[in-house]
Image (tube, rainbow, N blue to C red):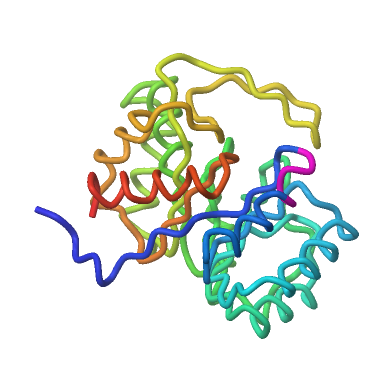
């Protein structure tokens, strides 16, 4: 039985992990006639973000419903995104993660959700913010690495029962572990979740998590937006 599509929105995303590739995604916005996207400026410093905002204003983009906050993003950036692009939902990483928020977002608390990353959101995180940003690929990788009875998997199950799920992230999950080097923290990570998709079947794991769908679902992939259109169509067929 499918969920009501009228209540769910899957967003293509402008991601920024691959150096310089985000500029090509900006060009794709008008080439593909896109009016709304999610935004992941998490690999851009303040100067690069200002350049990004300037370029986005020159497109026909109308709305950015969801933004993944980088840890050093200040209040004036949230004000700008909310007023210029009508951003409704933001997400941050846990206070225990390698990229915890550096500022007090008190005025935006009701719009901010904490993501399950390499670190599980803490009780203090959940007190501060509106609820949970549930990244299905991170959850699936943890389950594959540590098993169903692993402590991390059990903790996430507790969180999803207790707190509101305000936003989802979906990335690829590979059949074997992959190596990822974080160029910001210089840390190495080995897991099944990855931000580049090679085969649409790398999304099939999401079927397991249909009961945890939020109203807004962001595709977190480095693939071009044109490829993400195929991803969106595939996800609509298997989960909505």
Question: From the viewer's perspective, is 88 left or right of 143?
Answer: right
Give the quarter of the image for residue 190. top right
Image coordinates of residue 229 in percent, x first then y, are 43, 50
Give the main secondary structure of the magenta stretch: helix
> Which residue is found at the position 45% from the left and 33% from the top?
172
Image coordinates of residue 18 in percent, x first then y, are 72, 37
| Outermost left residue | 1
Magenta-highlighted residues: 19-23
Looking at the image, which is closer to me, 58 or 82? Answer: 58
> Which residue is found at the position 43% from the left and 54% from the top?
168
Give the quarter of the image for residue 215. bottom left
Looking at the image, which is closer to me, 162 or 35? Answer: 35
Is residue 20 found inside the magenta-colored segment of the image? yes
Question: From the viewer's perspective, is 163 left or right of 198?
Answer: left
Residue 123, compared with residue 180, is above or below; it is below
| Outermost right residue | 47
Looking at the image, which is closer to me, 91 or 164? Answer: 91
Looking at the image, which is closer to me, 107 or 67? Answer: 67
Residue 222, compared with residue 134, is above or below; it is above
Quarter of the rendering occupied by the C terminus? bottom left
């Amino acid at each position: 039985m499918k969920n009501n599509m009228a209540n769910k929105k899957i967003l293509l995303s402008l991601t920024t992990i691959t150096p310089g590739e985000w500029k090509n995604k900006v060009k794709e916005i008008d080439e593909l006639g896109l009016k709304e996207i999610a935004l992941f400026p998490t690999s851009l410093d303040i100067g690069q973000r200002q350049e990004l905002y300037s370029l986005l204003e020159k497109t026909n983009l109308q709305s950015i419903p969801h933004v993944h906050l980088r840890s050093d993003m200040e209040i004036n950036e949230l004000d700008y995104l909310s007023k210029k692009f009508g951003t409704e939902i933001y997400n941050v990483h846990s206070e225990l993660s390698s990229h915890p928020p550096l500022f007090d977002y008190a005025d935006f608390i009701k719009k901010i959700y904490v993501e399950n990353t390499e670190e599980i959101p803490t009780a203090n995180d959940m007190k501060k913010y509106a609820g949970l940003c549930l990244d299905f690929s991170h959850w699936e990788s943890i389950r594959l690495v540590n098993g169903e009875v692993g402590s991390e998997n059990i903790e996430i199950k507790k969180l999803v029962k207790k707190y509101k799920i305000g936003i989802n992230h979906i990335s690829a999950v590979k059949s074997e572990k992959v190596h990822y080097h974080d160029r910001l923290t210089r840390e190495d990570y080995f897991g099944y979740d990855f931000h580049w998709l090679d085969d649409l079947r790398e999304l099939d794991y999401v079927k397991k998590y249909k009961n945890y769908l939020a109203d807004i679902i962001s595709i977190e992939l480095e693939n071009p937006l044109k490829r993400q259109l195929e991803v969106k169509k595939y996800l609509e067929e298997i989960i909505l």
